[in-house]
Amino acid sequence: MKNKRLYLIFSFALAVSLFSAALVAPQTAFAESGGGTGTLTADGDGLAGIRGNGTVTISGNGILWIRDHAGDAAITISGNGVRDALPGGWIRYSGFNGSATVSGSQITVALSGYSIHLNATGTGKFVLRGNGSYSVVKDGDVVLTGSWTEDAEVLSIP
Amino acid sequence: MDVKRWSILLLGLTLTLMLVGCASFRKKGETTRTEILAPSARMTQSPSPSEEPDFSTLSFLEMNNLYLQLLEEKQAAGGDTEKADDIYLKSLEASLAGESALADRYLQEAILLLGY
């Protein structure tokens, strides 16, 4: 009788352990896959916006916005555009036609227009509205690909 | 019911729950999407100024192109675009926050401010 009870308790404990492991293991794997840095590459027409930590190179035609939240950004602009410093820390380049490279710990870069090419390495969130395609690479593997969307979908790097 | 039967039943239930749990997490983690791209509509056709815009028929890209086109025209004519610029920035910020409806509302307001 005692053996039977022990057997029952052991089985119950094993069942609980297995169930807990099943719940926790996938979350851990998901968290690990979200760590580190990645590289986003996107091409299209519409609005491309990204914020986060890293280096962003963006080119195309339209209106370019840059925001340096931490005050440590390095900004290099080539091409044409009328620069305006706006309230809230935004810098806008109207009639932009060229390329911009922005590096920093807390930056936002967005380009609204056409023939947009975006390359960003680091960590952050991005939105791509309109027509186009994108991919995110992490450790040499493509971890995310897709099309620019009609609605603003906030996606993550990596 | 004897103890062995209970144990087997318990283990069976656990395995089922594990499989269901794993399947749902795998589904959640699937982020790779491949879609056939629609042909790029680079610029919206120039609308007749007398027409009231029916925003409900326009895609985001069409509305955005319309805004950029009107902005360019107004700037070339030496008009004041400051209010529209401010509202468009709000649209941009809403888009970056994932708030599509709000972003589109600001974008439409910016278009109207440009004297559409």
Image (cartoon, rainbow, N blue to C red):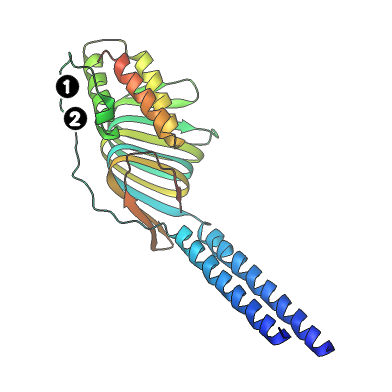
* Image-based side of B22 in relation to B109, left or right: right
Q: Nearer the viewer, residue A102 or A64?
A: A64
Q: Nearer the viewer, residue A86 or A145?
A: A145
Q: Residue drawn 41% across and 42% down? A: A153
- Disc 2: CA contacts within 10 A as few (<14), some (14-19) or many (>=20): some
Compute the Cα span from label 1 to label 2: 8 Å
Q: How many marks?
A: 2
In the rendering, which numbered label is found on residue A123? none
Label 1 and label 2 in one chain: yes
Give the residue furthest to the front.
B1
In the rendering, which numbered label is found on residue B44? 2
Q: Position of residue A11 (x, y in %)?
A: 71, 81
Q: Is residue B59 above or below residue A146?
A: above
Q: Position of residue B97 (x, y in %)?
A: 47, 35
Q: Nearer the viewer, residue A49 or A6?
A: A6
Q: Residue drawn 45% across and 26% down? A: A90
* Image-based side of B17 in relation to B55, left or right: right
Q: Residue drawn 35% across and 17% down? A: B84
Q: Amino acid at mark 2?
A: Thr
- Disc 1: CA contacts within 10 A as few (<14), some (14-19) or many (>=20): few
Q: Chain of mark 2?
A: B
Q: Amino acid at mark 1?
A: Pro
Q: Chain of mark 1?
A: B
Q: Position of residue B35 (x, y in %)?
A: 28, 54
Q: Quick one: quadrant of the C terminus of chain B?
A: top left
The answer to whether residue B74 is visible is yes
Marks 1/2 in contact by CB < 8 Å: the verdict is yes
In the rendering, which numbered label is found on residue B47? 1
Q: Is residue A65 above or below residue B48?
A: below
